[in-house]
Image (spheres, coloured by chain):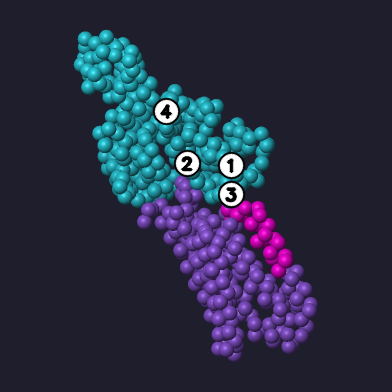
Amino acid sequence: MSLEYVIKGENIEKKFKGFTLAIPEFKIPKGFATALIGENGAGKSTLMNILAGIRLDAKGTIRYFDEYDQVERENANQKERIGYVGPGHYYLPHWTVKQVEEVSGIMFEGFHKDKFESLCQELAVYGTGGFDKAKKVSSFSDGTKMKLMLANVLARDTEALILDEPASPLDPLMREKLCEMIQSYIEEGNGERSVFFSTHNVSDMENITDYAIIMEHGKIVEEGFVVDLKEKYILVKGDAEDKAKAKEVLYTMTANNYGFEGICLAENLDKLAGMNITKEIPSLYQISVAVMKANSMMGR
Amino acid sequence: MLKAWRSYWAFTNDLYKLMMLVVVPVALIATNIYLVARGHGDGLLTLFALYFIDTVSDLFFMNGFYRKSNSSLEFLQSSPKFARFVKEITIIDIVRRVLVYQIPFVVELIGAADSAEKLQWCKGNAFWPWLAILIAQLVVFVARHFVVWSQMYACIVAGYMVLMFCFLLIIIVGSGSPVITNLVLIVLILVMSMVTVWYTNKKVRESYYDS
């Protein structure tokens, strides 16, 4: 089965003072949940803004659904097909929930008011105080603002979602709920819907992540399906006496008086031959941290 | 036009709608009826207050929309209809301003219907609402760049000064020909309105770029 892509980018470049986002090739597979992982300032939000059409001042070409590029996206109503949620000041601060609902109905053809209201209830946007649409967006906590944004974007007919840090302001229960919602969004799409989200909460989002992209210093340093990454990298645990030798092979290492553990490339495993080690499948969180640490060190 | 009105209605919050579409016009009508009942001329002075209310309320309406660092537009930017939406609400806001500013003059005119002398006075002062609209339009246009109250107040005071200067100029130069004065002001309002819509659209486009 050949893989289709919801977004494909080539030579994406955006320069800031002291920072350059430079991505020669970029792909988001269709029908999957793709996580964008990276340190603060790695360029995740910039990339997401470029893909969502919030930022039009980047170089390169981006193709959507293998049908149109970023110029055609602006000329036609193609933005309807992609829902975007961003952190911080997403709505005008003087707006109320009622205004958000009404403006959404005007701005997006495929917005369903009844679905929005039921999602607001489901996500407890109104808290224990009841259904109050007259509440100002600026009076909400960051978590409630995010829930409102998610209710809004999920109430639209879309084929892809670009979610910038959706889990960060949410409590653990809501993160679980977010994962369920992303999962059912993709499942209901029968392979036609995709989700691309950035996150620092890799552990919480791991169970729904199919594909991962790891960014560092404005570049993609690792990407692939999570199952493949878990074959590419191995979690190694060993005795303290071998830690000096193992350190040369491992991406990252944590050690104490009793032993060490760290991530290494599966292809480098034979370099640890002769040591008393145990091998385990690493989590996506462990792989991400290892890759980020390795590339941060290179960056310095 | 109905679509534009719907956009304006959705964009503005309930308090703004209540104040600017109900309370202010009703208060303006009531005040002017009261003033006309006492004698002609005084009612047009309410335009000074209206001009102030209009400029201050615009801060809540557009909320620093023109400023470079406005980071609250992401939701709107993600829609293909952003530019059209903002254009629609800007036009409706201008239409509202033009209509509301006519209230004092219309009340004066109705009150003066039974007196030829008063009617003559009204004809000679018909330029006042147009001048007030023009200055308000200009001040609102400039004030949309500010989110600091002191800057906006300075902008309003400058507007009052321009208003007074124009008033004196009209008295000295243009009072002989109220028709020409009115026509010139109407043309200026149209030009100013077109510039406002064009500039707002330009700001929408610029919001997608760093510089």
Q: In which quadrant of the rendered image does the C terminus of chain A lie? A: top left
Decide: marks 3, 4 in contact (CB < 8 A)? no
Front in this rendered view, residue A265 or A209: A265
Question: The numbered mark 4 sits on a residue in which chain?
Answer: A
According to the image, label 1 marks what residue? A140
Identify the secondary structure beneath mark 2. loop
Per the image, is B9 magenta? Answer: yes
Which badge, 4 or 2, comes first in the chain's sequence?
Answer: 2
Q: Residues within 10 Å of mark 3 (few under 14, many from 20)?
A: many
Identify the secondary structure beneath mark 1. loop
- Is residue A215 shown left or right of residue B147? left
Decide: marks 4, 1 in contact (CB < 8 A)? no
Q: Amino acid at mark 2?
A: Pro
Q: Which chain is purple?
A: B
Front in this rendered view, residue A95 or A77: A95
* Residue A20: percent from left, percent from top: 30, 45
Q: On residue A87, which mark appears?
A: 2
The residue sitting at 65% across, 82% down in the picture is B125
Q: Which chain is cyan?
A: A
**What is the C-alpha distance between the residues marked 3 and 4?**
32 Å
Front in this rendered view, residue A288 or A194: A288
Which badge, 3 or 1, comes first in the chain's sequence?
Answer: 3
- Is residue B27 shown left or right of residue B70? right
Q: How many marks?
A: 4
Residue B95, by quadrant, is: bottom right
Q: Residues within 10 Å of mark 4 (few under 14, many from 20)?
A: many
Residue B176, by quadrant, is: bottom right
Is there one chain holding both mark 3 and mark 4? Answer: yes
Identify the secondary structure beneath mark 3. loop
